[in-house]
Amino acid sequence: MATTVILDHPLIQHKISLLRDERTGTRDFRILVSEIAMLMGYEAMRDLPTELVEVKTPITTAQVPMLSGKKLAIVPILRAGLGMVDGILNLVPSAKVGHIGLYRDEVTHEPHEYFCKLPKGIEDRLVILPDPMLATGGSAIQAVQFIKDKGCNHIKFMCIIAAPEGLKALQQAHPDIDIYCGCLDEHLNEDAYIVPGLGDAGDRIFGTK
């Protein structure tokens, strides 16, 4: 059964608070996003399957657990999702990386695709889909659908901050995926920005306006 997890670990909450601060510069913001992604990834991959393999230690041989089963793919939603990739790769360096490019119409707030490149064999992989912000939910909903259309149904969505409106929309559109969220904020404003939020994550990661 799919689950939604709001991560309340003190380290995650502390680092998110630093992200919110408008005085946090591009370098520190980028580092914090990567660190938070790694901490969240640790929890999101808690249920990865393992199998016992024989290993020779300096003392003896032993049957020890190692990862098995489905291979992993990380598919960030461009462009802000790129900031979370390295943190997850620090945990699973062998994971394949795809990309889904979406931009939000400034008037309608609807997502539009401009790029989609997924690893081979995506239908047999566990896909981690990171995007720092879940605002209206439109981009996440469309990205999940792209991946499902390729035959993959084992998807975990990761965001650092979510608005209640976006979280509800994603849950209703894709009730079969797991969602991991660092913090659930108050609401969306009239411009579809999360309140209190942290501004535009992409601009703050890449130093653009």
Image (cartoon, rainbow, N blue to C red):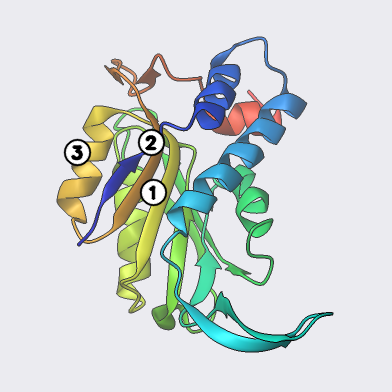
Q: Which residue is drawn at 53% across and 69% down?
A: 73
For label 1, the residue is 112
Mark 3 neighbour class, 10 Å CA radius: few under 14, some 14 to 19, many 20 or more: some
Q: Are marks 1 and 2 in contact (CB under 8 Å)?
A: yes
Q: Residues within 10 Å of mark 1 (few under 14, many from 20)?
A: some
Q: Viewer-proximal residue, 162 or 46?
A: 46
Helix, strand or loop status at disc 2 = loop
Residue 204: name its quadrant. Answer: top right
Residue situated in front as seen by the camera: 176 or 51: 51
Question: Crowding near pointer 2: few (<14 within 10 Å), some, many (20+)?
Answer: few
Tell me which label, 3 or 2, sits earlier in the chain: 2
Q: Name the residue under label 3.
A: 168
Q: Where is residue 35 in the image (x, y as percent from the top left)?
A: 64, 39
Q: Which residue lies furthest to the front in this view?
A: 59
Q: What residue appears at the point 18 percent right and 52 percent down from the top-left corner?
A: 173
Q: In the image, what residue type sits under mark 3?
A: Lys
- Where residue 177 sits, quadrant-wise, is bottom left
x and y, in percent, of residue 198 in the image: 50, 20
Q: Distance between the residues labelled 1 and 2?
A: 7 Å
82 and 72: which is toward the camera = 72
Name the quadrant of the C terminus.
top right
* Marks 3 and 2, how far apart at CA: 21 Å
User: Compared to 184, does 48 lie above or below?
Assistant: below
Q: What residue type is labelled 2?
A: Asp
Query: Rounded to the nearest whole Å, what is the CA distance between mark 1 and mark 3?
Result: 21 Å
Residue labelled with disc 2? 105
Residue 25 is labelled as: none
